[in-house]
Image (spheres, grey):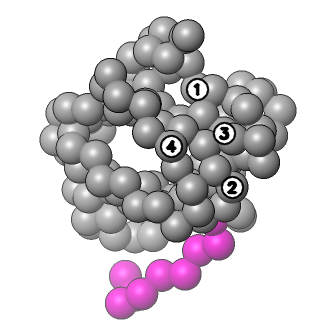
Amino acid sequence: MSDFTIKNLKEVDNSAGDRAPGFEARFARKHLDSEHLGVSYFRYPPNFKAGSGHRHREQEEAYVVIEGSGRMRLDDEIVDLQQWDVIRVSPAVVRAFEGGPDGLGVIAVGNDRPEGGDGEMVKDFWTD
């Protein structure tokens, strides 16, 4: 293993499938050869709200808004987001995003992932 790895996030497969036109989810963890870091890119189309949320058992995450604006639901609180905001989220907090009028681009960074992962999807989290 090399002492460094370079991977273009836009060259990582889009795991979003056909969830919504313009929605992207690119997970680079396995491409980085890192024991401790996960980095992902998410692109939410204009006015697209993720109805499902997720939380973790152990993994803390930070999100950096790199383009556009939007909102984020954190448990029962909704916060406005703008470019260059950084949001740290503790593992147990359920979170979901909504793209603003120009969409929302977010980089997510996570620490060590337990064997088999620790994410839990929460369906119908943000439906209003």
Q: Residue at x 27, y 66 (%)?
A: 35
Check the image and report above or below for 121 versus 103. Answer: above
Count neighbours of disc 3 (C-alpha within 10 A) and say few if under 14, some if 14 to 19, many if 20 or more. many
Q: Which of labels 1 and 4 is toward the front? A: 4
Q: Which residues are magenta?
A: 1-9
Q: CA distance from mark 1 to mark 2?
A: 16 Å
Count neighbours of disc 2 (C-alpha within 10 A) and say few if under 14, some if 14 to 19, many if 20 or more. many
Q: Is residue 41 magenta?
A: no
Q: Give the x, y percent position of residue 81.
A: 52, 49
Mark 2 and mark 4 in contact? Answer it, CB < 8 Å: no
Q: Residue at x 54, y 38 (%)?
A: 71
In the rendered structure, which amino acid carries the disc numbered 1?
Ala
Q: CA distance from mark 1 to mark 3?
A: 9 Å
Q: Give the x, y percent position of residue 33.
A: 40, 70
Q: Give the x, y percent position of residue 116.
A: 28, 37
In the rendered structure, which amino acid carries the disc numbered 4?
Asp
Name the residue tied to disc 2: 68
Q: Quadrant of the N terminus?
A: bottom left
Q: Is residue 3 magenta?
A: yes
Q: Secondary structure at mark 1?
A: loop
Q: Residue at x 50, y 43 (%)?
A: 80
In this view of the protein, which residue sits in the foreground, 106 or 82? Answer: 82
Looking at marks 4 and 3 on the same chain, the residue that comes earlier in the sequence is marked by 4
In the rendered structure, which amino acid carries the disc numbered 3?
Gly
Count neighbours of disc 4 (C-alpha within 10 A) and say few if under 14, some if 14 to 19, many if 20 or more. few
Q: CA distance from mark 2 to mark 3?
A: 8 Å
In the rendered structure, which amino acid carries the disc numbered 2?
Gly
Name the residue tied to disc 3: 99
Name the residue tied to disc 4: 80
Q: Residue at x 35, y 28 (%)?
A: 77
Q: CA distance from mark 2 to mark 4?
A: 11 Å
